[in-house]
Amino acid sequence: MKRVALVTGASRGIGAAVARRLAADGVDVAIQYYSAVEAAEGVADECRGSGVQAITLQADLRSKASTLNLKEQLDRLQWVPDIVVHCAGMAHYGLIDDMDDTLWDDLMNVNLKGAFYLTQSFGPAMRWKRWGRFVHLSSIWGEIGAAGEAAYAASKGGLNAFTKSVAKEMASSGITVNAVSPGAIDTDMLSTLDRDDREQLCREIPAGRLGRAEEVAQLVRFLVSDDAHYITGQTFGLNGGWHM
């Protein structure tokens, strides 16, 4: 059966890798972006190279109105996502004493409330079809916490709890809800690290290296497949043994 996926934050990094991986498997892909329109179009072109349909859609997932507009755009195109992969996210490093309310709210709204809006928007159609997949990109810090990243860790920890709760609500409708919790992945999020910091980080990881976005995409690929229909409410670590 032909599937349709919505991948948020898919203009770069893990989101882009997920979009390309699903397209290679024959899934039509809607690529949500916030501001990087050219990058998003580039990913869409790569997806089309796999022989599928791919579209780009702008939305601010901090806003319920913008998320509803995203759904309305898909409705007009008669695209009904069977798969939603929430990769859009914000990160911030700084002491809690120096954080203002706006930054805290932005982190919570994109990382956590965005998942809530997406579930409300696209869950009902999955219930009607009695098949659906939600995968949320979490983080190792949502499991173990991180000094200097309290808001980010809190938003991802909340996302893990949200994943488990929604999984229980939706399991009887044939919908699975899971989270992927990457460790140190070689994306733009780590671009501020200098060579020495990267080498030190790799020494802390038993596998001895950073993860690749494509490796995260492979795990997502399985979780949204028919073969994963009995897996729900789980948070899957992908960190080279950094946290067990």
Image: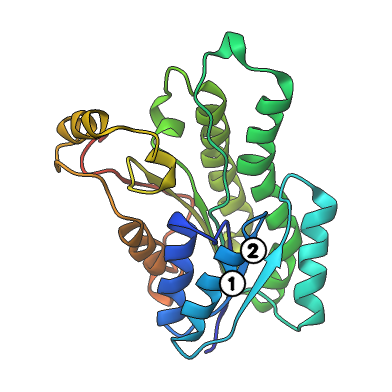
Against 3, residue 85 (above or below) is above
Q: Amino acid at mark 1?
A: Glu
Question: Front-most of 35 and 65?
Answer: 35
The residue to which callout 2 is attached is: 37
Against 145, residue 191 (above or below) is below
Q: Residues within 10 Å of mark 1 (few under 14, many from 20)?
A: some
Against 150, residue 23 (above or below) is below
Residue 197 position within the rendered picture, expressed as x and y whole percent measured from the top left = 26, 28
Residue 109 position within the rendered picture, expressed as x and y whole percent measured from the top left = 69, 39
The residue that appears at 43% across and 24% down in the rendered structure is 145
The residue to which callout 1 is attached is: 41
Q: Amino acid at mark 2?
A: Val
Question: Does any portion of residue 84 appear in the rendered image?
Answer: no
**Extreme residue in the right direction:** 65
- Is 131 situated left or right of 74 in this image? left
**Quadrant of the image containing the C terminus:** top left
Question: Front-most of 120 and 138?
Answer: 138
- Is 153 situated left or right of 106 in this image? left
The residue that appears at 44% across and 55% down in the rendered structure is 13
The residue that appears at 43% across and 17% down in the rendered structure is 147
Residue 142 position within the rendered picture, expressed as x and y whole percent measured from the top left = 46, 33
Separation of marks 2 and 1 at Cα, in angstroms: 6 Å
Question: Does any portion of residue 119 appear in the rendered image?
Answer: yes
In the rendered structure, are the residues bearing label 2 and label 1 in contact, judged by CB atoms less than 8 Å apart?
yes
